[in-house]
Amino acid sequence: MCAAKRKNTVKGNQIEGPIKPGQKVVVIEDLISTGGSSLKAVEALEAAGCDVLGIAAIFTYGLPEGKRRFEEAGVKLETLTNYDTLIEVALAEGYVTDADMETLREWKKDPAGFR
């Protein structure tokens, strides 16, 4: 099993563990926002000779930038849940109101520029 790390280790290695050229790998993530760090892990694994099948994550915000990056990179992303499901369940359970939903949807369109 090889693992790609986003954070620098003491040796500065991005991949830990033995790898073999052609080894099939799935990158596991907890959270996907823009996809930048996850795609860097894919690049490192591919440069090391791994055959990256895709990325599996617990949660994604489903941001437009992230979707675009994954499409451009040709990397498959599968998640257990996502932002849209989260806010719909929050509405159904009474954690947010109908009025809150518009704000939550607007935030997703442009989180960096949201006011």
Image (tube, helix red, strand yellow):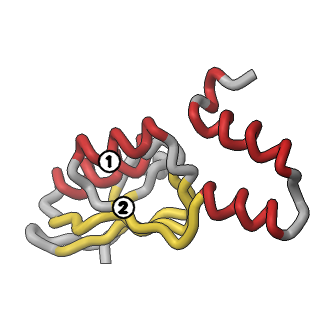
Label of residue 96 in the image: none
- 87 versus 33 height, above or below: below
Disc on the earlier residue, 2 or 1: 1
Residue type at tag 2: Leu
Whether residues under marks 2 and 1 lie with C-beta atoms below 8 angstroms apart, the answer is yes
How far apart marks 2 and 1 lie (CA) works out to 7 Å
Q: Residue at x 29, y 54 (%)?
A: 42
Q: Secondary structure at mark 1?
A: helix
Is residue 77 in view from this perspective? yes
Q: Which residue is mark 2?
A: 77
Residue sitting farthest toward the left? 22
- Total numbered labels placed on residues in the image: 2
Task: Report the side of 96 relative to 36 (left or right).
Answer: right
Q: Quadrant of residue 25?
A: bottom left
Task: Report the side of 48 relative to 68 (left or right).
Answer: left
Front-lying residue, 11 or 109? 109
Quadrant of the frame with the C terminus: top right
Q: Quadrant of residue 93?
A: bottom right
- 16 versus 5 height, above or below: below
Q: Which residue is mark 1?
A: 70
Q: Secondary structure at mark 2?
A: strand
Front-lying residue, 9 or 32? 32
Callout 2 environment at 10 Å: few (<14), some (14 to 19), or many (20+)? some
- 64 versus 31 height, above or below: above
